[in-house]
């Protein structure tokens, strides 16, 4: 039986590549997609998502817009990436878009999708948790129909990836954008699998990886990934604030193949305000989460490249 997945993303390059890859997984059925304007602008991210479904998807889907707003905005330079993906010729060859925009906003769209499915739904979130927090407030009964939440978010390292004024640098961005939403989800009974910076730091975008995809660009899907990652700064000499990692793609690959990673159980809390806001902190009496802390890097890149070849 296929795993039922609802996907809420925030329109970054790796979010959009994740949407592409999910649709190449044989044992996954996407029951819904929604887009939150966190690390993107909503309009190009919606267009790009609908075009990726048209070009690389199979079943019929609509895409819901989120009307959620965060507390700490993402840098504009990063949010612009969605415009570049949307403009790729490979997504614009047909000159039309068939996949419709959903009538309801993201959090209500997700509630419907969860109830509509007979089996429990796995939630895949590769942006902030705002829509999930709002959905839980709106209809707490969804909780028992959620198999688990798989989230790209958080870190238990000393240093996160937020470099902003008035912050101490301990947070990961998807938590930092809306720390209270993460706090709300921590207060629920949902099983949480965190693909945290511990593991995503092990999969930076490198020139080697790009060259591998360039060499295999005769495959449409590999070419698409190569085009997408041509927009992002790779790791060359040392990590900077703009260095791109395959954060969300690792999270998505984990949904398709758990054998790629190692996990451990950690009790934690979320800091919701002050200079550490967005920090996830290990605390003995905190709520348990499953943290992906290690990944087989080569197996991961092989896995996503082979998936892309199926497109
Ligand atoms: O913190 C990682 C999250 C992921 O969901 N995003 C990007 C991924 O989609 C925010 C982010 C952190 N550093 C970034 C980010 C960077 N250098 N460029 C773009 N986005
Ligand atoms: Ca993201």
Image: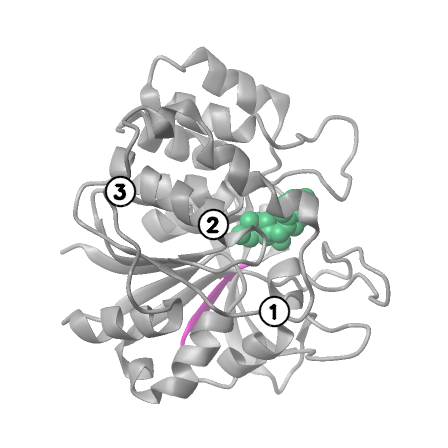
Secondary structure type for disc 3: loop
Measured along the vertical axis of the image, is residue 302 above or below residue 169? Answer: above
Question: Which is closer to the viewer, label 1 or label 3?
Answer: 1
Disc 3 under 8 Å from ligand 2? The reply is no
Location of the N terminus (image quadrant): bottom left
Q: What residue appears at the point 38 percent right and 72 percent down from the top-left corner? A: 107
Sort mark 2 into few (<14), some (14-19) or many (20+) by Cα contacts within 10 Å.
some
For the rendered model, the colour scheme is one colour
Question: Which is closer to the viewer, label 2 or label 3?
Answer: 2
Measured along the vertical axis of the image, is residue 236 above or below residue 169? Answer: above
Q: Is residue 198 visible?
A: no
> Closest to the observer: 55 or 250?
55
The x and y percentages for residue 304 are 40, 34
Q: Is residue 36 visible?
A: yes
Sort mark 3 into few (<14), some (14-19) or many (20+) by Cα contacts within 10 Å.
many
Q: Is residue 24 left or right of residue 232?
A: left
**Residue 43 tag number:** 2
Q: Earlier in the sequence, mark 2 or mark 1?
A: 2
- Asked if the residue at tag 3 contacts the one at tag 2, i.e. Cβ–Cβ closer than 8 Å, the answer is no
Q: Is residue 171 left or right of residue 254?
A: right
- Asked if the residue at tag 1 contacts the one at tag 2, i.e. Cβ–Cβ closer than 8 Å, the answer is no
Distance from Cα at disc 1 to Cα at disc 3: 31 Å
Q: Which residues are magenta?
A: 190-195
Disc 1 under 8 Å from ligand 1? The reply is no
Q: What residue appears at the point 24 percent right and 68 percent down from the top-left corner? A: 113
Q: What residue appears at the point 36 percent right and 70 percent down from the top-left corner? A: 148
Disc 1 marks which residue? 70
Q: Main secondary structure of the magenta part?
A: strand
**Residue 25 tag number:** 3
């Amino acid at each position: 039986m296929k795993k039922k997945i609802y996907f809420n993303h925030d329109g970054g390059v790796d979010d959009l590549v994740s949407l592409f890859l999910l649709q190449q997984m044989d044992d996954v059925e996407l029951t819904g997609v929604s887009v939150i304007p966190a690390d993107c602008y909503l309009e190009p991210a919606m267009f790009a998502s609908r075009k990726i479904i048209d070009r690389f998807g199979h079943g019929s889907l609509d895409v819901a817009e989120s009307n959620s707003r965060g507390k700490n905005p993402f840098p504009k330079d990063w949010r612009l990436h969605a415009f570049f993906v949307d403009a790729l010729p490979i997504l614009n060859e047909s000159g039309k878009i068939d996949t419709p925009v959903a009538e309801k906003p993201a959090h209500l769209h997700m509630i419907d999708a969860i109830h509509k499915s007979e089996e429990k739904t796995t939630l895949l979130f590769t942006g902030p948790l705002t829509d999930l927090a709002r959905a839980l407030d709106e209809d707490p009964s969804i909780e028992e129909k959620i198999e688990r939440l798989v989230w790209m978010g958080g870190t238990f390292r000393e240093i996160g990836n937020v470099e902003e004024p008035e912050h101490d640098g301990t947070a990961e961005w998807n938590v930092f954008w809306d720390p209270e939403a993460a706090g709300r989800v921590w207060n629920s009974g949902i099983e949480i699998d965190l693909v945290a910076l511990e593991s995503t730091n092990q999969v930076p975008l490198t020139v080697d990886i790009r060259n591998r995809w360039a060499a295999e660009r005769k495959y449409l899907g590999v070419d698409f990934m190569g085009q997408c990652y041509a927009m992002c700064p790779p790791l060359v000499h040392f990590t900077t604030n703009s260095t791109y990692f395959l954060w969300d793609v690792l999270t998505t690959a984990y949904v398709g193949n758990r054998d790629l990673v190692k996990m451990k159980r950690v009790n934690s809390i979320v800091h919701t305000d002050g200079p550490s806001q967005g920090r996830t902190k290990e605390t003995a009496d905190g709520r348990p989460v499953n943290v992906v802390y290690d990944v087989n890097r080569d197996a991961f890149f092989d896995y996503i490249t082979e998936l892309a070849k199926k497109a």
